[in-house]
Image: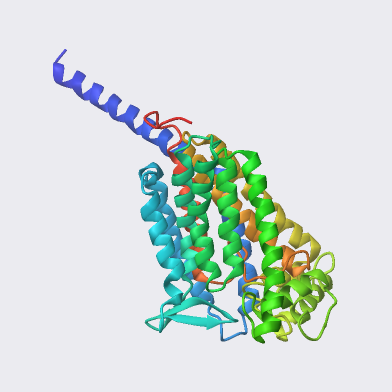
Amino acid sequence: MPISPLLKQQNAGSREINAASLGRRVLASINFPLLFVTAALLAYGLLIVYSAILDNPDYAFSRQLTGVGIGLVIMGALWAFDYQKLSTFAFPLLIVSMFLVLLPLVPGLGVNINGATNWISLFGLRLQPSEFAKPLMILFGAALVGKYRGHINDGREYFLALGLLMLPVIGVMLQPDMGTALVFLVVAMVVLFAGGANRKWLILTIVGMIAALIFIIALDGFLDNVLGVDTLIKEYQKNRILVFLNNDIDPTGISYNLRQSKIAIGSGGLFGEGFGNASQAELNFLPEYATDFIFCVLAQQFGFVGSVALIALYILLFFVSLTIAFAARDSFGTLIAAGVTGMWVFHVFQNIGMTMGMMPITGIPLPFVSYGSSFMLVNFVCLGLLCSVWAHRDNKTRKKV
């Protein structure tokens, strides 16, 4: 038998094996539960946003869709990218994070909205740089803490890591944007906890932060009385604390927003008033109903059942994200997934909690649901990082924890 037909058969067989192997690798790189739950959340969120802004010329649904489209491209690029290549760039990531956080404080560039200078105006566009610093903060924290390989028992190492992680937190507080500062703080504590920090030091840190907050509140009251002006804590921040402590205080004044939020949620009943029937938003009783208070619009339209469905999707998202953290083959990947999960958990808990008076009111949006292309892009960046951690979990050349 001639040799050439044998070679052709062998080559054809080899190509079939390679194609099958490639197909298996591609399938193995896809976390189908993650894609399912995020697709469901995204579809649900787009439906709610569309109904909320349908008759409002101040919002553009096309902008939300643009954010989703760009986000999908970014997610795909990060999915294919080897996340581990970023593990040695801790300080460059910190520098870029601080640049974004401090950018609104540049004279002539920052824009003051609702008492905080956390936006910038650039070429006619308004952006919130601290939003884009969130995934960078996660990467920086994971790169910084990951080098300890799951054990931080030395006090000097712990407080050095804590001090570096607090820099973006302090930078955001200067704006002041307490909501974003809390997000950064939660990410820092989650990364330290997942990174194996000594529990004694973590407890000491939390107790110290609570004591510092009480001291600042007391000092602020003293300074305000002496100087006659707001010093450490702004008036609107004090009002939010007062409303949190007493939901019924001044219902037509400082607790008006919370009151309207509760009315919207309560009027939804079990099954809601139906798609497009969110009277609290349509009549402009509910503030920031497409962004911060989007959950109230959902609750009024789809009621308790629709609200539970959203929360169930979020719980599934958290669970899948944690499985990716446990599946990662190195501490850097584990901490990235833990940081992303911690950020999403706090956003959901804080946003939904504040609409019911369980948490102080802050400008923290709902992941994949709230209107706004900036935060939508951030969510897709985090999603891409999770996909990258999952896709590269079986690479044997990686360092194991």
Task: Kindly identify the residue that appears in the image at 48 percent across and 56 percent down.
Answer: 137
Left or right: 34 in relation to 200: left
Seen as rendered, the residue at the extreme top is 1
The answer to whether residue 230 is above or below residue 393 is below
Seen as rendered, the residue at the extreme front is 226
The answer to whether residue 31 is above or below residue 220 is above
Q: Quadrant of the N terminus?
A: top left
Q: How many marks?
A: 0
The front one of 116 and 293 is: 116
Task: Kindly identify the residue that appears in the image at 59 percent across and 60 percent down.
Answer: 183
Task: Kindly identify the residue that appears in the image at 82 percent across and 82 percent down.
Answer: 251
The front one of 387 and 124 is: 124
Would residue 68 be seen by someone viewing this image from the given angle?
A: no
The front one of 182 and 263 is: 182
Task: Kindly identify the residue that appears in the image at 26 percent across and 27 percent down.
Answer: 12
> What is the x, y in percent for residue 248?
85, 76
> What is the x, y in percent for residue 84?
39, 42
Left or right: 207 in relation to 138: right
The front one of 120 and 38 is: 120
Using the rendered view, name the quadrant where residue 298 is placed: bottom right
The answer to whether residue 198 is above or below residue 100 is above
> What is the x, y in percent for residue 21?
38, 30
* Colouring convention used in this rendered image of the protein: rainbow
Would residue 41 be seen by someone viewing this image from the given angle?
A: yes
> What is the x, y in percent for residue 240?
72, 74
